[in-house]
Amino acid sequence: MGGKWTVLELLLVCGGATLLAPLCAARTAKACSLPPQMFDHRMAAEPLSEAQREIDRKYVEFMKTVAQSYEQRNAPDVNACCDTAKEDIIAFQFCALVRYLLSDRKESGPFLVAMPGTHDQRKAFWFMELISAGGTHDTPTSLPGIPLPNGLLFKFVDEIFGLMKKGNATAAEKYLFLYDDADGEFGEYMDDQLPKLFVGYPQQVLALWPIFQKHRKRLEMLQGFTNERERKRIVAKYEGLCKAGDNRCAEIRSVFVPR
């Protein structure tokens, strides 16, 4: 009996049997088709209500479907599913991440364009972690082919941070726009990341400094999230790094050690 069930379970894997292909395709199409204005309906629903949990489950089903295609390196299916739901803000942001990963991180432009640039987009972005729990209290530690050791939202932050380390100006704009509004565990996570950028990538920081200056007030809060040893390392890193008349190094040092 156990052997029969094993065979049946194998047959039920999408793509495992020709006869089941239409059924699997229909199931995938349903998962890719999100109701219009679903995020708005979620925001209007009573917090922790069954209506809200059902919406989150739909989102997670969508995420798993896209991620499954990503794991199979099936770009046509990823694109087809994502194009179906491109009007949904959560799906749009999530798909931008998956497509970026699918390009082996070579096509950063569309990914960064999809990252929050307005207050409404940022508000939706912060809710993605709760949504990814799918109506439960447990956020996923992975999706098919996508490890999420710290959660889905941290994966986004890490990828943007990775581009900023390469000196990508758009990534710096997006990261710092999120950082301005980050609090709780997300704020703490970014507070821990940024000093590593200042220590490990000084040339990139200098190049991006005009962008950082726009967020100076928020950056000055790093004084309270770094210890004396870290602050001294950063100050030492920018001693003598700038030529005469270049005030960037002095301005960076003053962020961590006020004059």
Image: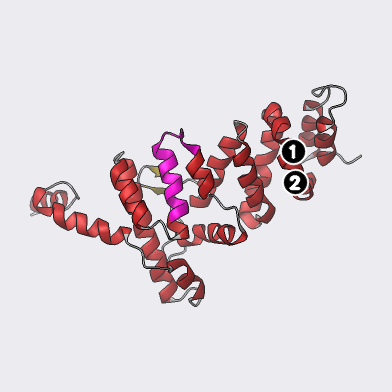
Q: What secondary structure is found at the residue carrying circle 2? A: loop
Residue 198 horizontal side relative to residue 156, left or right? right
Magenta span dominant secondary structure: helix
**Which residue appears at 37% of the width and 58% of the height?**
85
**Disc 1 crowd, CA 10 A, few/some/many (<14, 14-19, 20+):** few
Residue 153 horizontal side relative to residue 73, left or right? right
Quadrant placement of the N terminus: bottom left
Q: Is residue 104 above or below residue 80?
A: above
Which residue is nearer to you in this view: 210 or 195? Answer: 210
Q: Which mark is residue 81?
A: none
Quadrant placement of the C terminus: top right
Residue 68 seen from this side: no
Q: How many marks?
A: 2
Q: Which residue is mark 1?
A: 210
Where residue 55 appears, x then y in whole percent?
Answer: 40, 68
The answer to whether the residue labelled 2 contacts the one labelled 1, judged by CB atoms less than 8 Å apart, is yes
Where residue 151 appears, x then y in whole percent?
Answer: 49, 51
**Which image quadrant is residue 258 in?**
top right
Is residue 210 highlighted in magenta?
no
Going by the numbered disc 1, the residue's amino acid type is Pro
Where residue 161 appears, x then y in whole percent?
Answer: 59, 39
Residue 227 seen from this side: yes
Q: Which residues are magenta?
A: 92-108
Going by the numbered disc 2, the residue's amino acid type is Lys
**Which residue appears at 69% of the width and 53% of the height?**
180
Q: Which residue is mark 2?
A: 214
